[in-house]
Image (tube, rainbow, N blue to C red):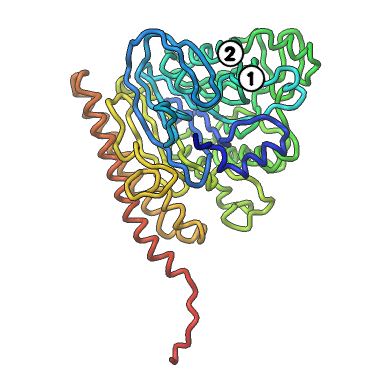
Amino acid sequence: MVNRFKYLVGLATFGMVMGTVSSASACTTVLVGKRASTDGSTMIARNEDVDTAWAKHYVYHAANSNGPTEYVSKDNHFKVTLPADQQRYTSTPDWQQVDGQDQFGEDGINGSNVAMSATESGTTNKRAQKADPFVKHGLEEQSMLDVILPYAHSAKDGVKRLGHIIETKGSAENNGVIFSDKNSIWYMEIVSGHHWAAVRVPNNKYAVIPNQTMIGNVNTKQGNYMYSKGLVSFVKKHDLNGYVNGHEVNLASAFGTNGKEDAVYNRPRVWDGQRILTPSKKQSITKKHFTMFMKPDHKISVTKVQKVLASHFNNTKYDNNGKWVGGYRPINVPSDVESHILQIRSNVPDDIAGIQWLAMASPATSVYVPFYTNITNTPANYQKGTNKPDNSSAYWTYKMTRVLTDPYKNKLINKDVVPVQKHVQKHLDQQLATTDKQAEQLPSDQVADFLTQANQQNADYAQNAFKKLNQKLTVDATRQTKVVQNKNL
């Protein structure tokens, strides 16, 4: 098979520098508790960073009851027996399939309105790795969504199911995984071959998470934590950093890293996200430790989350479209292949509650299309695209916007892209409100077909607008070329 990772030289180099095991994707996560959001919804979001030319698809998996099935990964031969009943769910796999098996499903919402985003790739320090090595044929990112999301009936249930697999089958890599429903968000970190911990996100707070272990003290006597069997005794037995007492450990200290590479690659992204959402708290980008959960200065909207995911240190001296002082790694990078915001709303009926906001390619030069997940199929233009450019897939339309603006940085983005983004996003937001009202009036057996059609219409509207934008950008980009000529001749 073609190896997804062979294109990821820069990220692989980072992994070698860190001296740790990590998967190839290098992402940034944003979590928003229901009392921290403007409308009482939970939001889990992430940029998936893979390569500068690697199409993602958006697909729908129907519910079925085919009986117990043994799942075998075509990638590393991980095996697990799955339950008989599978719920419907959505996902955003790579364009490349192996023998019909989706690869790197990444994010989606299921029939119980449980959302899952997997994964936020992390690193484990050498000492912890030696004590509990990663498992060659254990669960890895490319399989995770498909073996967990169809069977989770709540956010907490998702953590339990994944935790059980890690403890019994092992993990092939360090990963952060997010689960949400309309009531709660759980953030889970898989930190070694068989150990993990999860924390319930406070309802009134948010978090911005880079490729670094972020969970601090895990108190096994408190109900807002979940953890692997024997976690505390394991840390004590192997004399890892972070042991507090017989029922408490600091996960980040025991398993994570916080060195020079993190100072350039990871911590600055936390600083940037917190700068946007809590500007009243003045912090230095060189700060060695950031509080994981923060209160926002103002309630957080979907639009505000979009702003964070599209940020490249905008309006600061660290902007990588400007002087790029310090060379810090931004949230938004050229290797973004898709960005998602999984919103579970509590102020609408359950059959329209799940919205998968999806921006293909770079969120800085794309638009977040709101997709209902109680559907019968996904838009046709989101089921196309490879690693070669085309004129029809959603991914390559939005990728071309990035390609055409990159050489001129903020100039063409501010002049051409931002006005179109605002106009299209406003239209999509209005359509979402209108479709909500219309769907609420329909018999339940007609809702899925209606929402499927609405998704296609929104997808077409946005993509057509960006195709026209790309034509304008082509002309405007050519005019940036300096022409030297004698006007007297």
Q: How crowded is mark 2: few (under 14 residues within 10 Å), some or many (20 or more)?
A: some
Q: Are marks 1 and 2 in contact (CB under 8 Å)?
A: yes
Which residue corresponds to mark 2?
169
Residue lying at the far right of the rendered structure:
239
Which residue corresponds to mark 1?
135
Residue lying at the far bottom of the rendered structure:
488
- Tell me if residue 343 can be seen: no
Q: Residue placed at 75% from the left, 21% from the top?
A: 130
Expressed as whole percent of the image width and height from the top left, the position of residue 330 reads 59, 45
Q: Residue placed at 34% from the left, 36% from the top?
A: 383
Q: Residues within 10 Å of mark 1 (few under 14, many from 20)?
A: some
Q: How many labels does the image show?
A: 2
Q: Say which quadrant the C terminus sits in.
A: bottom left
Q: Which amino acid does label 2 sit on?
A: Lys
Q: Between residue 22 and residue 226, name the one nearer to us.
A: 22
Q: Residue placed at 43% from the left, 49% from the top?
A: 399
In the rendered image, the vertical position of residue 59 relative to residue 169, given as above or below: below
Expressed as whole percent of the image width and height from the top left, the position of residue 292 reads 63, 28
Q: Residue placed at 31% from the left, 51% from the top?
A: 465
Left or right? Give the position of 403 relative to 437: right
